[in-house]
Image (tube, rainbow, N blue to C red):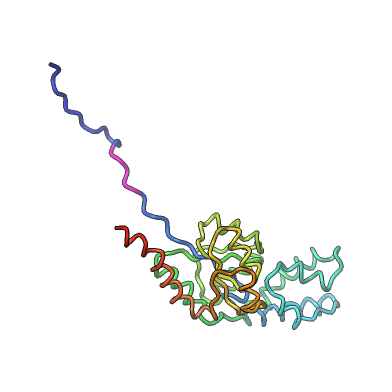
Amino acid sequence: MAAHQETTPRPGSAPAAPAPPAPFTVGFDLDMTLIDSRPGIRAAYRALSAETGVWIDADLAVTRLGPPLEQELAHWFPDDRIPAMGDRYREIYPTYAIEPSLALPGAREAVRAVREHGGRAIVVTAKHEPNAKLHLDHLDIAPDAVIGWLWAEGKAEALREYGASAYVGDHIGDVRGAHTAGALSVAVPTGPCSRTDLQEAGADVVLDDLLAFPDWLRDHLADRRAPRAQQA
């Protein structure tokens, strides 16, 4: 009979502890979702108009916020001038647009609510990323990450990268971005798109504004956890 041999685990052979679950992630749009950038953008367009001598109806332009800057500049400049005008607008933007822009009601509380529930809050915007960060720093809104230069379906790139389960925005382009990423579309009619516009675009949830977001998030997370609790 073979002698019984005791074996001892080799160093490092113990099973690794299971990794903690990844935090859930909620994405937010910037302009007219977290911040009212209309006063600042209006001032920046007026400064660009004065500098170039080209008429820009700044009051009209701020009713169309959401799409990339170049789409708006195309209403006022010929195609061959748009790249240079875009560069110049972004260059003067910090001088004119940061100070006048305000946080929308509930913006800080919405970002804070995600954190309080153990999640990550990210901002995904079509805006020039350095200028987006200037706005957030100035208004003391502190997401975990800021990703710029993405619009509509293109926002799905960042939402997927960060594993976002929901995306909050004010524009039908934000609804498309959320759905392209396989995320829940949470919409607020605080920008150029009405509640009806957002519903018809397929938003999964439409809140009156971000003041309603913390309660919605609490209930949403409770609903997600309920099936697992019932199975335990």
- Image quadrant in which you'd find residue 23: bottom left
The residue drawn where x is 21% and y is 31% is 8
Q: Magenta residues? A: 14-18
Can you give x and y, in whole percent of width and height, for residue 144 in the image?
A: 49, 64
Q: Is residue 134 magenta?
A: no
Residue 62 seen anywhere in this rendered image of the structure = yes
Residues 56 and 180: in front is 180
- Image quadrant in which you'd find residue 76: bottom right
Which quadrant is the C terminus positioned in? bottom left
Can you give x and y, in whole percent of width and height, for residue 176 in the image?
A: 63, 64
Can you give x and y, in whole percent of width and height, for residue 231 in the image?
A: 32, 58
Name the side, left or right, on which 100 lies relative to 24.
right
Picture layout, residue 209 above or below residue 118: below
The residue drawn where x is 15% and y is 17% is 2
Q: Main secondary structure of the magenta part?
A: loop
Q: Is residue 17 magenta?
A: yes
Can you give x and y, in whole percent of width and height, for residue 33 in the image?
A: 58, 75
Name the side, left or right, on which 61 lies relative to 106.
right
Name the side, left or right, on which 222 lies relative to 32.
left
The residue drawn where x is 59% and y is 61% is 179
